[in-house]
Image (spheres, rainbow, N blue to C red):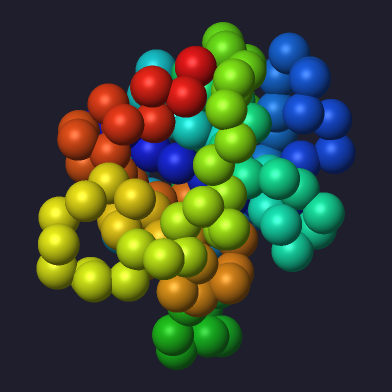
Amino acid sequence: MAFAIKAEVKDPRAQTFSFAAQKTMYGGKHVAEGDTIFVFASENEGGQGLIARGVVTLSEAIPRRPDLERQTPRVSISVRHTASAARRLGRDELKRFKDWKDGRPETELNFKFYRQATNKIVGISDETAAFLDEFF
């Protein structure tokens, strides 16, 4: 399974990215060392969407807090940057894909990343991973 993360990225050209205590949804809590991950620089923090493909080099689950009844699982990860995106893909390009049941990779990304504006790590389908590979 491949993953994608939408988060604040301070240096899109960095050789490694570190993301501390990131929310996970849609299977994102299963991210593990060696997994492929696509990095989206969050537009909420001035980013431009898809910027990189990488390999997870460290994945560490954050323990749940016993004082909270409901909480989203969080994971800290490090990513080795393996490729930079050659074409743009972000909120503007994905917002028109709103038929949640059409099975398109663009719709999966729009649903998982932009239906809720929060930054997060998500699991993505093999079809969506293949679609994203076309941007490199």
* Residue at 22% in and 41% down: 125
Residue 32: tell me if it is visible: no
Residue 108 falls left or right of residue 79: left
Q: Is residue 112 left or right of residue 56?
A: left
Please tell me whether residue 18 is drawn above or below residue 41 in the rendered image.
above
Q: Residue at x 77, y 28 (%)?
A: 12
Q: Nearer the viewer, residue 33 or 49?
A: 49
Residue 14 position in % (x across, y down): 79, 19
- 2 w.r.t. 16: above or below: below
Q: Quadrant of residue 9?
A: top right
- For the question of whether residue 131 can be seen, the reply is yes
In this orientation, which residue lies closer to the viewer: 92 or 120?
Answer: 92
98 left or right of 23 in image: left
Q: Give the vertical position of 135 relative to 5 (above or below).
A: above
**Image coords of residue 108 (percent x, y):** 30, 56
Q: Quadrant of residue 86?
A: top right
| Residue name at image x 28 percent, y 38 percent | 128
- At 39% from the left and 31% from the top, the residue drawn is 132
Give residue 75's position: percent from left, percent from top: 52, 49
Q: Quadrant of the N terminus?
A: top left
Residue 79 in which image quadrant? top right
